[in-house]
Amino acid sequence: MAKKPKQKTAWNKGKIVGPKPALTARQVATIRGVLAERAPLRDQVLFALAIDSCLRGSDLVRLKVSDVMLSGELRDKVRVQPSKTKSRSQTSIVFEPSRDTRTLLTRHIDAEDLLSTDWLFTAMQRRGGPEKPLSERAYLKLVKKWVSYAGLNPELYGTHSIRRSRPAYLYRKTGNLRACQIMLGHKSLASTQLYLGVEEEETLSLARQFEL
């Protein structure tokens, strides 16, 4: 008797899929406050830099001290070539760490006694083992914890929620999609429009104004 073929389980079974919403300014402020009270310095710096830089998680966790510091001084502007687009485009992401982020960065680098060639954010390691950068999975777990501090459902948010937060806030305040494109390092405005869900938000906004 022939065995019935095993049914494959969908990769997204039981998961909430779709674009992850950005954090609001109030939610970001709440998370900053909680982290300042109960989180290690590394996590405070990681969150602050994630908000300021709008980097993908894969690029954020692989930052080295030399990316943010030159000759013992923090860079005024940080330029990062995204690993995802390196082979297809020369578009880089340029950002200026805020004053508070710069303070946290300096404290973190000094406290960890980091050299220019060291990873900025390292993973927990065995005694005497080689230092490794924080993994993307570990960063995602931190993000889930952070959003819970703001009373949000961790299942609805991810690393792209952090990446979207600043440009989404900028677009709501100014409508300047080109600035958001540069901030995210996108090659086209269409990509930025899709990434931020601009058309969907504007459609819903119009629908609210013309309810039947």
Image (tube, grey):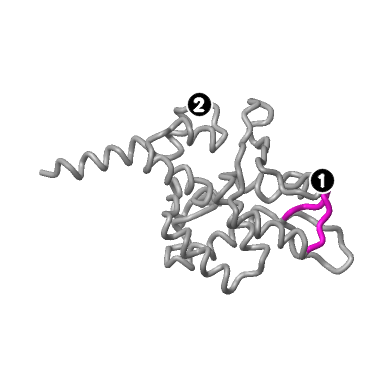
> Viewed as shown, does residue 26 lie left or right of 140?
left
Q: Residues within 10 Å of mark 2 (few under 14, many from 20)?
A: few
Residue furthest right as drawn: 128
Pick the front one: 166 or 144? 166
Residue at 54% across / 32% down in the picture? 186
**Residue 157 spot, x, y in % from top left:** 47, 55
The reply to whether residue 187 is in sight is: yes
Q: CA distance from mark 1 to mark 2?
A: 35 Å
Disc marking residue 158: none
Q: Which residue is mark 1?
A: 71
Question: What element does badge 1 sit on?
Answer: loop
**Residue 191, x across and y down, in percent:** 48, 31
Identify residue type, mark 2.
Answer: Ser
First of labels 1, 2 by sequence position: 1
* Left or right position of 67 against 30: right
**Quarter of the view holding residue 212:** top left
User: Residue 121 in the image: x percent, y percent?
Assistant: 72, 56
Of tags 1 and 2, the one toward the viewer is 1
Image vertical order of residue 125 relative to residue 105, above or below? below
Magenta run includes residue 113: yes
Q: Which residue is mark 2?
A: 188
Q: Amino acid at mark 1?
A: Ser
| Residue 23: in magenta span | no
Q: Secondary structure at mark 2?
A: loop
Number of disc labels: 2
**Going by the image, does 133 lie left or right of 205?**
right
Q: Which residues are magenta?
A: 112-120
